[in-house]
Image (cartoon, rainbow, N blue to C red):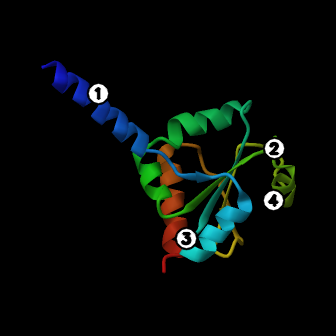
Amino acid sequence: MMLLVVTGCFAGSEDATAAKIQWVTNLAEGLRLARESGKPVMLFFTADWCAPCLELKKYVFTDKHVVAASTRLINISIDADKDYETLSAYKVRGIPAVFFLSPRGEIVSKYGGDRSAGSFAKEMKAVADRHAR
């Protein structure tokens, strides 16, 4: 009986670990991956002190539909406190900021919808569909 309980706990933790967006934290590396794979990019500007950013990470970017949609994109997370060059290049005025880019790195759109998981998943799927090979 105890073995089943322990096994069940470990199985659940593996599922939780698997259900995460895979982030690249370097713009150049992410854009290289996008070009090579033909996948569009979700570019997310964030900071540790940003409460709305933390909410996105906790409640939206962990949603199973958002995580599933993220597999069709190259996901780049930029720390606004550490990468001023990228922040400036995209003219980010406030965070969180989310841009969708083509596989060639051109801005397709800046996310401006509500910050619900359903809205994010819908936009991610639409961008991926437009750039499907």
Residue that appears at 18% across and 24% down: 3
Callout in the foreground (1, 3):
1
| Image mark for residue 90 | 4
How much space separates mark 2 and mark 3, taking CA atoms?
26 Å
Mark closest to the chain's N terminus, 1 or 3: 1
SS at mark 1 in the image = helix
Mark closest to the chain's N terminus, 2 or 3: 3
Residue 32: where, in percent of width, then height?
A: 66, 70
SS at mark 4 in the image = loop
Callout in the foreground (3, 4):
3
Residue type marked 2: Lys
SS at mark 2 in the image = loop
| Image mark for residue 82 | 2
Residue type marked 1: Cys
Mark closest to the chain's N terminus, 4 or 2: 2
Give the quadrant of residue 39. Answer: bottom right
Residue type marked 3: Lys
| Image mark for residue 39 | 3
- Looking at the image, is 54 positioned above or below residue 101? above
Q: How crowded is mark 3: few (under 14 residues within 10 Å), some or many (20 or more)?
A: many
